[in-house]
Image (tube, rainbow, N blue to C red):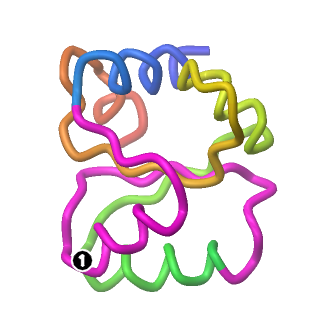
Amino acid sequence: MDVDRGIRVAVDTGDVTLGSEKSIQSLKLGKGQLVVVAKNSPKDILEDVEYYCKLSEIPVHTFDGTSVELGSVCGKPFTVATLVINDPGDSTILEIIS
């Protein structure tokens, strides 16, 4: 449950990029400190995310839930398959996952 809280606090107090396309754009630029992907993310998105994360040495965390559940953890009324944490704000998410 700590991961869920960490994600929520990061969304509320930090700088988080939501959505696969925007996340992948950020990763291409080498931006972000951590990427979270829902475990039901489409395979092509997952491959892109893992590829760009490897290039930029950004850790990837697979969220143990669906994109619907990840969306609700973020407090959003839509699905979130991928998110990039640029600045965790008051969250301890980077310590929890690393």
Residue located 20% across and 64% down the image: 31
Left or right of residue 29, residue 94 in this image: right
Residue located 46% across and 19% down the image: 8
Give the crowd class for mark 1: few <14, some 14-19, many >=20 residues within 10 Å.
Answer: some
What span is in magenta?
Answer: 15-44
Magenta stretch contains residue 19: yes
Find residue 35 and report its horizontal and vertical position in percent: 42, 54
Find residue 88 and report its horizontal and vertical position in percent: 24, 31
Left or right of residue 96, residue 67 in this image: right
Q: Nearer the viewer, residue 64 or 89?
A: 89
Find residue 73 and report its horizontal and vertical position in percent: 61, 22
Find residue 23 and report its horizontal and vertical position in percent: 41, 62
Left or right of residue 8, residue 53 in this image: left
In the rendered image, the vertical position of residue 88 relative to residue 17, given as above or below: above
Residue located 50% across and 76% down the image: 50
Mark 1 = which residue?
56
Q: If the image is split into quadrants, where does the N terminus sit?
A: top right
In the rendered image, the vertical position of residue 55 relative to residue 59, given as above or below: below
Q: Secondary structure at mark 1?
A: helix
Question: Which amino acid, by three-letter code, is at mark 1?
Answer: Ser
In the rendered image, the vertical position of residue 30 relative to residue 73, given as above or below: below
Q: Nearer the viewer, residue 80 or 6?
A: 80
Residue located 75% across and 53% down the image: 39
In the rendered image, the vertical position of residue 16 relative to residue 5, given as above or below: below
Magenta stretch contains residue 7: no
